[in-house]
Amino acid sequence: VIPRLLDAARARVQMADAVAKTDETLSVRLRDGEVAAAHATEQAGHSLRVVADGRIGVAGTTGVDPDVLLEAAISSAAAGEAAPLLLPSPSPLPRVHTHAPRAGSVTTVELIQLGRLLTDRLRRGDRSVTVHLGRSVGSVQVGNTRGVDTGYQVTLVTLDIDVVSQPGDGSVQVVTQLAGADLPDQAAIEMLLADLEQRLAWATTSAAAPATSAPVLLLPEAVRTFLEPVQQALVGKAHLLGTSPLAETLGEQVLHPSLTLTDDPLQDGRAGSRPVDDDGVPSFRSTLIEAGVIRRCIYDLETGALAGRPSTGHGRRATFGKAQPAFSNLVLHAGEPDLAALIAAMGDGLLVDAVAGGTGGSSRSGTFTHPVVLGYRVQGGEVTGRVEGVVVAGNVFDVLGSIAGIGRDARWIGSSFLPPLLLEGVTVAPR
Amino acid sequence: VLERLLDAIQSSRADYADIRLERSFITSVAWRGRRLEGASTGTDVGGTVRCLNAGHGWGVASFNRLDDLEARLARAHELSLVVRPAHPVELARAPVREGHVRPALGDDPRDIPLLEKRRYLEHLNAEMLRFDRRIVDTQAAYRDEVTECWFVNSDGTALHELRPDVTLSALAVARDGGVLERAVESLGARGGWTRVRDQDELFRTAARRAVSLLDAAPVRSGSYPVVLDPRLAGVVAHETVGHLCEADTQLEDSVAAELASPGRHLGGELLTIGDDGSVVGLRGTLPFDDEGTPPSNTLLVQHGVVVGRLHSRETAARFGERPTGNARALSFRHVPLVRLTNTYIANGNGTFADLIRDVKLGVYACDAVGSRHHGDSYSFTAGHGYMIRDGALAEPVKGVVLVGFVTEMLGAVDRVAGDFRWHESGGGCGKGGQSPLPVAEGAPHIRLRSAEIRGQAP
């Protein structure tokens, strides 16, 4: 479809590019080992961007007749804005593993078997176990009027486990997840289960909250929430608009020297892996923060054109609307100490498993107030029980300036690879 | 189309099956600062098939290509047979319905050129930019979506409906030295282009508020008598009682089941809260929900006591109650969940002046820009606010966050004014990954005897 669309576009507009995405997903949810729901989804969408009379227009459709797209995109261009868009020319793509044939052919029965196996390992008298499994197989095709005509196949297997236990003095919910191009291997499953059991064990008894100024150790899931304002500040669009708190700090050391963050689309088999972005720009690894120094923001073609900067290969296009800059896989570099050493090092403090995100502060300024959904007290270098009814508050850019430790036990959460982070300067307060 | 769907559904071997198809025409225009973010159009086409068999649960197939509905039905039927929930799904009985609903859209957004929409938004955005030199960033956004929906089920129900939705939103950011403040306003309507015309004042209001917040002092944390404006009161009703009374939420969440069990006190004597998807012309109103049930006015809390729940056909059967017409899906990509429509606090007596007359020191909290909850504790971030001093409105304050436990917050309601009004924002409700679903909220001013305000100032 894309070559035909682009041929038609060549006759009418100065330049054009198009993306076609397909996806076929199968998902099941098991509640205490019984299948509670099963859902099959097939999706296909086309998005066309044109430059006509120097103006950009876009249109999208999920319908079977993408030819209507050209007229719609031209009318969008008539109402659109001028931008010095320069489409990429064809070039070889890097190799990256995004597709596992056996994951694409997993059946409903196999998903259910895996779900039952996980449930059986986790079930006890006082626990309720919900397992959500999904597998997708899809394709991305990208083309433009300069001759780019490329694409790749993707598979994605996702696993979400939610365990609710009733340890006698309340109810505790512990969650975990896994996502990747292939089915998780036995070692990955064993690690996931061991980690989940450890956290369930920590949550069994309750403990008092630590002092307001106690150190705070974040587990990977909580690190993800804390990183959100940093991510937003590194999107080129925020720099273009002057809304990024890091806009004036490129090349400067503003965060702790132990902090290095890369965006890596070339990691094999991860949820954000891809050889080319949706603008047709070949993917490459970008260092965003190097030893606390802000090195780079991410741009798609259009934002880059407006900012007078090259694309960093971060264009993402949905079926509807224009391309936006978006991260691929985010990798926060791990440190030396294992989790036990970090817990021992903090002495007395709060180990944070999960926080509520949302509107607890201003992402722009970096201030936050996160209710701790699941946290544990650390006393004498050991975990002594779960803590309820506290919030953690502070400013992300301040607390990431004074990191007391980064752990070695990093985990993939969705498309982010995150180690535990030991922080000082976070306020622990009653909710 | 309906005949084709009814033919297809005859082929299903499932005990129950339904098909929902949609075709949407979407346009959106967004300005950011002095730049056009984009003006784009799209067509979204697809459907979902659900099948149910006795002793099993839902098998679901969704798709974009409409050409082989029989195969989709067969797939959903197969999936239903592998689903074996602890409580097999049953459906409350529902009469067979037929209907064609086509609201008169003399000003159909599909007939308005994209260029005209772009020019109008440019004008609204400029209203904010030129309002004050301290306005440093703006967003002005417009979106319309006109959806043609078809629904049939194996009982013989066949419905065809046109659902229009138009939204406008304004964001203004003001800066003075190192102080940065933002204000938002929005509007949503189940109607055509005229519903969003002549909205200059909405955009000026956002700009005016952002500028006025620059000089407002942060509110001091503490316990105060708090008066909520109708917008914030409506959002509180939606987020607390509304969500707690969704039957599917109660089945999943023991906290909700306990807090909103019938007969339980959830609010003061003056508090009556309901959900009414049948009010003519509101954003949460529908002729039929996404299972073909007409929405109704469902009382949830009456004089402070829980009296009702919101249902789909599935949850109604589970609770032995009647479907309320609250099974709604965001689009053809999703299955219907129990969702709110137009949630309200019933009108009381007296005026705003009556509510603040005997307040010596209190807070007037207006609009909601954020809310969240964990278990039975809630927080609501007001868009702006004022101190109340000696029975009169005093200086503006910012950073007003209302925090507390739901039973305390609602139990503290000691006055409900007689100035009820509906509010249709351009946002929407989120649940189970389906957001934003068009809803409306309505309330009069209400007063909390005492509530906890968490501000930035200690």
Image: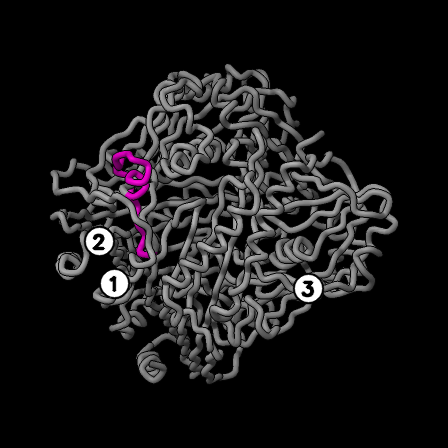
Residue A187 shown in magenta: no
Q: Is residue A372 visible?
A: no
Q: CA distance from mark 1 to mark 3?
A: 42 Å
Question: Which quarter of the figure is the C terminus of chain B placed in?
Answer: top right
Chain of residue at mark 3: B
Q: Magenta residues?
A: A302-320
Q: Position of residue B137 (x, y in %)?
A: 49, 42
Provide the secondary structure element on which disc 1 rests: helix
Tag 1 and tag 3 share a subunit: no
Please name whichever residue, B371 or B8, is drawn nearer the observer in this view of the structure. Answer: B371
- The residue singled out by tag 1 in the image is A69
Q: Which mark is residue B421?
A: 3
Say which residue appears at 50% left-offset and 36% top-offset. Answer: A363
Please name whichever residue, B434 or A348, is drawn nearer the observer in this view of the structure. Answer: B434
Chain of residue at mark 1: A
- The residue singled out by tag 2 in the image is A18
Amino acid type at circle 1 is Leu
Amino acid type at circle 2 is Ala
Applied colour scheme: one colour
Q: How many marks?
A: 3
Residue A234: name its quadrant: top left
For disc 2, the neighbor class at 10 Å (few under 14, some 14 to 19, many from 20) is: many
B306 relative position to B341: left or right: right
